[in-house]
Image (tube, helix red, strand yellow):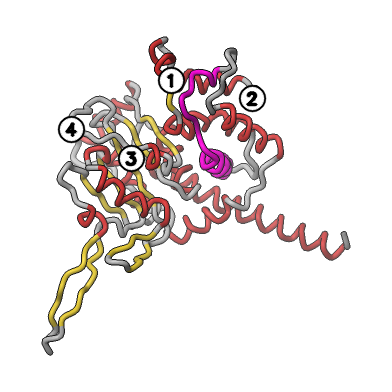
Amino acid sequence: MTAAKTENFERIDQAIVRAAESTAASVRTARAAIGAVIFGQDEVVERALITVLAGGHALLIGVPGLAKTKLVDTMGTVLGLEARRIQFTPDLMPSDILGSEVLEESTTGKRAFRFIKGPVFAQLLLADEINRASPRTQSALLQAMQEYHVTIAGARHDLPKPFHVLSTQNPLEQEGTYPLPEAQLDRFLMEIDVDYPDREAERRILFDTTGVEETKPRQAMTAEDLLAAQRLVRRIPVGQSVVEAILNLVRSARPTTNGSDPAKYIAWGPSPRASQALMLAVRARALLDGRLAPSIDDVLALAEPVLKHRMALTFAARADGETIEGVINRLKTRLG
């Protein structure tokens, strides 16, 4: 390699370092701004930010009252995104999400169809209780999540950039719901469990939300800043050991006939899309922490939220009391 090429590569590397440092500072400011409003959910906030930085969608699982909706509203304000909310119900139609064409007549008597955009045309979409909608309506959202455009009457309509779906689901009440098919679950980069806050966090919630004034979120980034951060995430280098750890973990989470392998409990496992999701997620986590490269610790930390909605246990495993979380933890121990 010539001296000129070496100098050019060094200049590029320095540019990436400077961009990463600046972006990491902005993202940490955004995380702090969200944490000033959402108490006791640091891990949830971190994983939601990682999902958005990685350019993906997230499924938030938790009982009512744990600030899932407030989290999405707060993220929209802090990240400078246009946010909208759809309350999913059994009678919701695809046109209620995507939009529809209406016939209009001009002053000259000429008639023409005009497309009226639905709430899916947002940068951050909250799909509240997504499993309450019918499969037909759920599938209408599938194209938007995967292809970032919708097709109405044969015409393509591109969604705004960035576009992210954060869906909520109640793990307790299943009456009148339609479980998400595996194909749609696979479109979510992460499944994020939203648990109860600890005592001190709940104390802060009591004082902040029942007083005269409630803390309001403040904008820390713009949509352009987020798009730049997403592009930077894809440029962050990943070491060979981390790549091998991702491949080993995802491939070991697929069914096997080996009687001594934890994967014997798995009925179906993650596809290569899970490897892609984990690769992007560990890069985003490194950037969020101000690091210039991900580590195996990032793989271990994000293995469960990235993999668990992409796996199912056999009937025998469920009968023996096995859980997906338990199987993933055993697979993680192999990585050290």
Residue 176 circle label: 4
Residue 37 circle label: 3
Label pair 4/3, CB-CB below 8 angstroms: no
Of helix, strand and loop, which mostly describes the magenta segment? helix
Q: Is residue 32 visible?
A: no
Camera-side mark, 2 or 4 = 4
From the image, tell me which residue sits under label 2: 335
> For the magenta stretch, what is the residue range?
262-288
Residue 15: x percent and y percent? 67, 58
Quadrant housing the C terminus: top right
Front-most of 174 and 181?
181
Label pair 2/4, CB-CB below 8 angstroms: no
Front-most of 200 and 246?
246
| Disc 3 residue type (three-letter) | Val
Residue at the extreme front: 257
Residue 150 circle label: none
107, above or below 201, in the image: below
Mark-to-mark CA distance, 1 and 4: 25 Å
